[in-house]
Amino acid sequence: RQYKLLTDEELSSQEIKPVNWTVDGLIPSKSVIMLAGKRAAWKTWLGMVLAVVLASGLPFLGHFKTKKSCVLYIDEENGPELLKERIGNIKKGIGIGGYLENLFYLSHNGVKLGDPGFIDFFKE
């Protein structure tokens, strides 16, 4: 692998395109994010809220504008029963009734992100 070290002068002289945001000021479009933290730090809840507001186009945490997006929420920890209850509570809490046509779930499917079978499934 080749690494390209930039000097401050080189970075400063580059033409930079404006950033397109999925969540204004927090998550750039076409990016990959990871929620990390200590056990019981509310990562799962934050991820579920983020999934619901992105699928609906509502502001994240009532403040940050979002771009309405198609969302795949992968839950390999809690299972569909708990996922259904929590997502339902989140939707109710932010005033969403009914179904979000662009919100999808995989729960307890044994997903491994590097698995070629999952990658092919995801591409489809």
Image (cartoon, grey):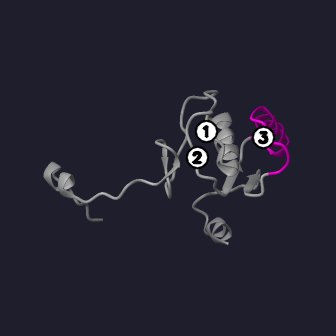
Alpha carbon distance from label 1 to label 2: 7 Å
Return the x and y of residue 120 as percentages of the image width and height: 64, 71
Quarter-of-image position of residue 62: top right
Q: How crowded is mark 2: few (under 14 residues within 10 Å), some or many (20 or more)?
A: many
**Amino acid type at mark 1:** Phe
Query: Sequence-wise, which precedes: disc 3 or disc 1?
Result: 1
Disc 1 to disc 2: CB gap under 8 Å:
yes
Q: Specify the quadrant that holds the C terminus.
A: bottom right
For discs 3 and 1, the disc positioned in front in the rendered view: 1
Residue under circle 2?
66
Return the x and y of residue 103 as percentages of the image width and height: 73, 54
Q: Residues within 10 Å of mark 3 (few under 14, many from 20)?
A: some
For discs 2 and 3, the disc positioned in front in the rendered view: 2
Quarter-of-image position of residue 123: bottom right
Where does the magenta region start and end?
Answer: 78-99
Residue 97 among magenta residues: yes
Is 124 rendered above or below residue 75?
A: below
Return the x and y of residue 121 as percentages of the image width and height: 68, 69
Residue under circle 3?
87
Is label 2 in a helix, a strand or a loop? loop
Residue under circle 1?
60
Which label belongs to residue 93? none
**Amino acid type at mark 2:** Thr
Q: How crowded is mark 1: few (under 14 residues within 10 Å), some or many (20 or more)?
A: some
For the point 63% across and 36% down, which residue is it?
46
Quarter-of-image position of residue 112: bottom right
The front one of 60 and 40 is: 60
